[in-house]
Amino acid sequence: MVHNYIVKSRQKHPLHFTLLDPGKMGPDNLVELATQTAEAGTDGFMIGGSTDLSLEKVDAAVDAIKDITHLPVILFPTHASSVSGRADAIFFMSLLNSESRQFLIGEQIASARWVKKTGLEPLSMAYLVVAPGMAAGKVGQAQPLPRDDPNLVVSHALAGQYLGMNYIYLEAGSGASAPVPAEIVKAVRDEIEVLLIVGGGIRSPEEASAAVKAGADIIVTGTLVETSNKLKEEMSQLIEIIHSG
Ligand code: 1GP
């Protein structure tokens, strides 16, 4: 079970997940990036993106990654149509600050029976888009949560926890110029008991360390993995600092 793996691993140290977007790269590139980040010590892979992804592309990406690693492969979907039954688990998430029913509960209803049929492990998650929000905010029709209003973010996170969600994801958006502010991460950490994931705009060991020190359980990086020229070296440094807490 992926949830058990995450809980057990977290007892040892904070975790790093690598986000790979099959809409941005071909299978060969994807395998190369997955191999190097696995060697650098990442704790799991998330597959997804804000663009329209075909099921074939996601299936191929999951297969390719599972060929080279035993680390968990978790779907991070935007639409029900790209939910691959070949992954280990799915972040079964609701974008709590979306203004659209589609992203609050519509895509989830559309995929629920498929998740059951394929045996994907659902990891219940509240997805909160913090400004700037980037493509995730636009596609998800979110009103991004202001960066200077920790109380409002805490209210959303608590609502997610009280609805039974086991994970809260604070998302600044892929490629954001700055990560979610540490004050927000800390404010949420202080109030919730469930696992806290932070991503969007984290590119340096210092930024990752600040998020961990503020209380993140899992740090997600995508853009850094896609753009680094010294991937293994840079990822090793970043992951080491995350693992050291
Ligand atoms: C996006 O939080 C993730 O969903 C990763 O963001 O691409 O900025 O690392 P980056």
Image: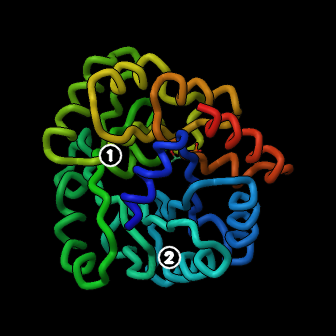
Rendering coords of residue 67 (x, y %)? 63, 81
In the rendered image, the quadrant that contains the C terminus is top right
Rendering coords of residue 111 (x, y %)? 24, 73
| Mark 2 or 1: the one toward you | 1
In the image: residue 237, left or right of residue 66: right
The part of the image, by quadrant, that contains residue 117 is bottom left
Which residue is drawn at the image coordinates 74% and 54% (left, top)?
A: 40
SS of the residue under disc 2: helix
For residue 54, above or below residue 154: below
Rendering coords of residue 206 (x, y %)? 68, 26
Where does label 2 land, which residue? 58
In the rendered image, the quadrant that contains the N terminus is bottom left
- Judge by depth and name the residue closer to the eye, 98 or 193: 193
In the image: residue 162, left or right of residue 165: left
For residue 78, above or below residue 125: below
Q: Amino acid at mark 1?
A: Tyr
The part of the image, by quadrant, that contains residue 112 is bottom left
Which residue is drawn at the image coordinates 38% and 58% (left, top)?
A: 4
Is residue 173 visible in the rendered image? The answer is no
Where does label 1 land, which residue? 167
Query: Is disc 1's CB within 8 Å of ligand 1?
Result: no
